[in-house]
Image: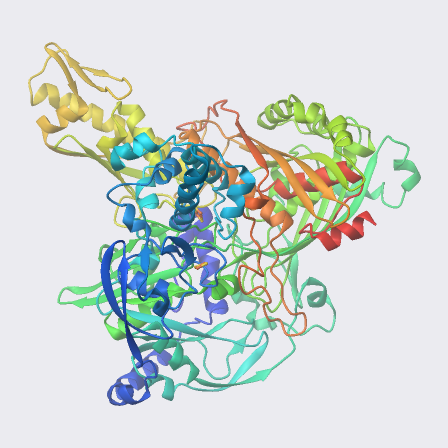
Amino acid sequence: MSDKLSRRGFLKGGVLATGLIHADRARAQDDGVISNTENLSKTKATLEESGKAAKDQSSQEHVWNSKTQIDTWINLQPKNFEVSAEDLSLDMLRSSGLTSCKKACGQGVCGACTVHLDGVPVNSCLLPATALHKKEVTTLEAYLEKPHPLQLAFLEEDALQCGFCTPGFLMEGIHFVDHWRERFGNSSPSREKIAEAMSGHICRCGAYEGIFKAIERTCRGELDAAAEQGKQAANRTRVDGWEKVSGTAKYTVDHQFPGMLHTAVLRAPHANAQIDKISTQKALRAPGVEASYLALMEGAKIRFFGQSIMAIAAQTEQQAKDALEMVEVTYIIKSPVVGIKQAMSKDAPLVYQEDEQNNTPSAAEGGTFPAKWNRNVRGPVKMHFFAKPKKAEDILLNLRGDAPLHNEGKVSYINSKYTSQAQCHSSLEPHACIAHWQEKTDGVFVDVWYSTQAVFITAQDIAERWEIPIERVKVHAQYVGGGFGAKATPQAELLYAIEMSKQAKKPVKVVWSREEELIVGGFRPATEVELETAATTSELQAISMNAFSDSGVAIGGAIGILPRILYPEVPKKLLDWDVLTHGPAGRPFRGPGGPAALWALEQNIDQAAVDLGLDPIEARLLWDKDPIRQRLYRWAMGLDIWKLRNSKSAAGRSERYLRGIGAAISAWPYFLNPKTQIELRSNGVGGFVARTSTQDIGQGVRSVISVAICEKMGINAADLDVVVGVSDAPMGPPSGGSQSTASVTPAAEDAASELMMLMTDLAESELGLQEVKCIFKKGKGGIKHSEGFLSWSELSELLGSLTVMGRRRRDDGGYKINMGVFAWGKAQPAGLQIYEVEIDRQTGKVRPLQGWLGIAAGRIVVPQLAKSQALGGMIQGISYALYEERLFDPNTGRHLSMDLNDYKILGLGDLPMLHVHFDHTSLDSVEGGACGIAELTTIASAAALGNAFYNACGRRVYDLPLRPDRILKVLS
Ligand code: FES
Ligand code: FES
């Protein structure tokens, strides 16, 4: 067995798999999982010895023994439960199989656990189970037979993506809608009213616009007739939508298996320490404990607050937590390094000694590039592609310190410093894994239910690390409650679940709490960016960037990647530096490096335009010759909001409020997995099944495959099942780097063509039909023959089961980089954002009023879902710019943002009006014509808001997030 999780991923999964390699190290360092076979076997032996004693003692030591009987009605059925005073309603309901109520925070903040108690919405995560006595409880399962119109409206408006928050929103929404209609008839409530009613709910995917519309339409009674027809009236544009709005979609956290063990993890209470002594004996003898994993041994270094030390699996989660209390650890505590400034000081403690520097985890989505170390600083990272550093330096050298020359209005030279904060991924479904290790007569079999963005790569990693033939490993991820990059690579939860299942010979479930999610669940690095630009009215002359990233104990901030592909003709000197601190390892987050890079670059560009008396978008049109972005510049310049921006800003100003409008451009590489395959089967009874081992994390890849096949064959979506989220299907792409759509669309179309050809041939050879011709007609595809017409479904029944394999064909002209299962294609998708903001001079609050996003990514396969994704990306970008901020205690390195109150995510009430424009011009070189859009939608938001702020007040803000205290300071 190898000591670390697989490194083969780089070859297998490209942009995400490269993350795997480094996430190996991340796991090793972050969660203390540097492999310890010897240690494991010791732990196992101790467990076996202590097992008997534990059982003997269990009845004496277990404190959870004061049970009480409660009688309740759940979804109109009388039920009784035996509960203890400590039990919570949510856990009780979920363990009885009602998994529509989700646990996303357990802190009463997100609303995912909402149920009705005597008809009133409550957060069941905070409600003692005893409070259900003699009460009536309603969960979303109550609407399985007869849907509520709001469920159908959610599907009509696509008011969901990953769907994890959806049952909670629906339960709150149903209560609101029903009461609204009782009082006000079929009328529309205001957005303010809806936002107020939904204020206790968070959707990390940002499906808010659809939620507003769905509630409005249901209040007007528009879905009543459809609801009368039952679930067959459900809109299936989002192929897995019904499962998500009915609460029947099973996420990893929802699965339960007989005998399954639950876990808890002991985490370090210090940011920089060494384990002096650790004693686990008592814990291993604790009641219910059946397995453990010791991640850090005596002498091991702790490099961040929350680093995992030991995991325990027991019959109940409480038993696992109780057992952890019995682990005795003493620490040698040292001063931590917190933040970039402190880490760069000469006398800062070292996060890694010289001999440890080759084993650092990576926060990069791609591979990390070589660089030298100087104490806690690593860099500059050598990435010389798409840049001309010497030329840039020569140009800038002439301008530095020569203010009079460049202030004559001919040259704009700007030298600024920008900072940005760490942003936590915070998917609403936390990191979770259930592993079942089974030793059978014919060998070991491992089934893993995993909240992951990469089933295929995960299965390969498991096979390699535990030396099991790949055909005996199966990874399941039918539904994934958000990822955003943090679940792109296997993490410690997978390791712990498998190792402990192997020990206990039972299924073992590992689920991070919200607190753990915010600490070790992943974050976008904090940055400091020094940026110089030089421009004249006719050209952008040079860009120089020094970008310092704080990814905690990880390297690979890679802020300078994105500026390489923007303004391609301009000489650039782009230097990336990693600054190591005592914090958990960062992970790739939607558009890695992009938001921080554009926050600096696009504000400097904006300022240069202002300095030179140019319209900021017109300036970009002059300085950036990329044809795709040129189309977006022209689109933006034609918008009324832009044409009238100065008069509109002036008109919106008052003594208290300022108004401004700003824009920023973005680009994202066109990534794909050229080896994607889709198996398409005609099932012999009139239906079709498509299978590939990708996963739908809310981006709608099931729907993309469905549309690509149905449009090609002319069949109805109802006749096609799309199976994803299983690793034993043919190779599909990871969900990350915006590569899903570009990978699956052509493979799905190819599968459809192959099947039609095969069926046409067999119609002649097997059925003896003559003059056979394919007919492509929406919903009516099939073959015409000398005696009439047969639809593909009818042919399926006549020909029996048939299977073909569709492959992604190579792009015309090839790729910039092709590594087999990962390629960087030649097209260049782009996005442009514009915001109108209002600034409150009294409170310092920045409020976006409206936003526009133009996207040029070729063909949009499922426009409604693409629009949802685009809105969600903008919302995540606004949330990052205005609210989200991970905070540490500067003295101890402890996290201060431990719940979703302290770590604020944008809610419905904060939502501006948002508009999305797709430039459908085809990208000819792209096979299938479609590129992904996920990253493009979010990376320019902060920069566009920063530029709008400048337009409002003539002052620039350099630090993210745009907190009121900072804004007041800038305005003063
Ligand atoms: S899980 Fe109950 S409010 Fe978040
Ligand atoms: S759809 Fe709301 S959290 Fe994903």
Q: Is residue 344 left or right of residue 857?
A: right
Q: Residue at x 74, y 70 (%)?
A: 346
Q: Residue at x 49, y 48 (%)?
A: 198
Which is nearer the eye, 547 or 905?
A: 905
User: Could you say which quadrant of the image residue 685 lies in?
Assistant: top left
* Rendered position, 524 above or below 948: below
Measured from the top left, where is residue 622 in percent x and y?
71, 25
Q: Residue at x 33, y 41 (%)?
A: 148
* Residue 325 visible (yes or no): yes
Which is nearer the eye, 698 or 177?
A: 177
**Residue furthest to the right:** 404
Q: Is residue 278 left or right of residue 227?
A: right
* Rendered position, 597 above or below 552: above
User: Could you say which quadrant of the image residue 650 lies in?
Assistant: top right
* Residue 670 visible (yes or no): no
Measured from the top left, where is residue 600 in percent x and y?
70, 45
- Looking at the rendered structure, the number of numbered marks drawn on it comes to 0
Measured from the top left, where is residue 275 in percent x and y?
52, 83
